Image: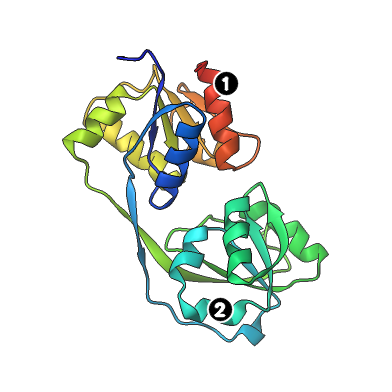
Amino acid sequence: MANNMTRLLITRPEPGASSTLKLAQQMGMDAVKFPFFEIAPHIWDAPPAADFDAIMLTSANALRHGGEKLRQYIALPAYCVGQSTANLAQQMGFDIAHVGRGGAASIMPLLRAHHRRHIFCPSGGHRAILTDEQTSGLTLFPASLYMAQRVNMTSAMIEAIKQADIISIYSARAAQYLSEISKQYEIDLSGKFIAALSHQIAAAMGDNSLQYIIPEYPDDEKILRKMKAMSQY
């Protein structure tokens, strides 16, 4: 490559893509962004806040696209996945009861310990699948506040994937899309690093032979620092 730097491709949707790009550049990385998905608001019905004793926020996009209806739940203690989600929730006026680092499943034991039983769960149209064992003793009420729609591949996006040394993926759907694209356009991923936000996301690639970069817990800065260290920028 022209500057012999490792090229990072950021595929998460906006506005997260621009945020990650800015952070990567501040850390001295050669990075570009081509989001795989576009986020669009989804019409939803707001159940009475009195029906719940907590709210679980797994995505900042739910907060961005929930509209005024979401504000009726501000009095509920908020259990958040990820610091960025917690920061935005706090800015909106939510009282943060806990910030989890291991995905929605890691919050379930804490909800039980805090005697929260009826949980409002605003998120996107595709959400993490939790087992009956994980949700035992809890009643989760999901609501789809936004949808993540696939972006059609362009020649520039295909070229960016080919040229990238590290490709970051932030969801299982992004992993599946990358896998499909690589097969359709015969792109060899074996010589690249796949930076996945979690082991579950990496597993969605369906290829254990690839080189993965996975942080100890889902965190944007954490995974960027790990990319930088492993690729020897």
Q: Where residue 90 appears, x then y in whole percent?
A: 63, 65
Q: Quadrant of residue 120?
A: bottom right
Q: Are marks 1 and 2 in contact (CB under 8 Å)?
A: no
Describe the element under mark 1 as helix, strand or loop.
Answer: helix
Q: Give the label on residue 229, or none.
A: 1
Name the residue located 52 percent from the left edge and 59 percent from the top edge: 60
Name the residue located 58 percent from the left edge and 53 percent from the top edge: 84
Q: CA distance from mark 1 to mark 2?
A: 41 Å
Q: How many marks?
A: 2
Describe the element under mark 2 as helix, strand or loop.
Answer: helix
Q: Amino acid at mark 1?
A: Ala
Between 106 and 135, which is closer to the camera in this rendering?
A: 106
Q: Where residue 50 appears, x then y in whole percent?
A: 66, 86
Q: Is residue 152 visible?
A: yes
Q: Is residue 205 visible?
A: no
Callout 2: 10 Å neighbours few (<14), some, many (20+)?
some
Q: Is residue 20 above or below residue 9?
A: below
Between 219 and 123, which is closer to the camera in this rendering?
A: 219
Quarter the N terminus occupies: top left
Say which residue label 2 marks.
71
Q: Is residue 4 above or below residue 55?
A: above
Name the residue located 82 percent from the left edge and 63 percent from the top edge: 113
Q: Amino acid at mark 2?
A: Arg
Disc with the residue nearer the chain's start (1 vs 2)? 2
Callout 1: 10 Å neighbours few (<14), some, many (20+)?
few
Residue 58 relative to residue 10: left or right = right
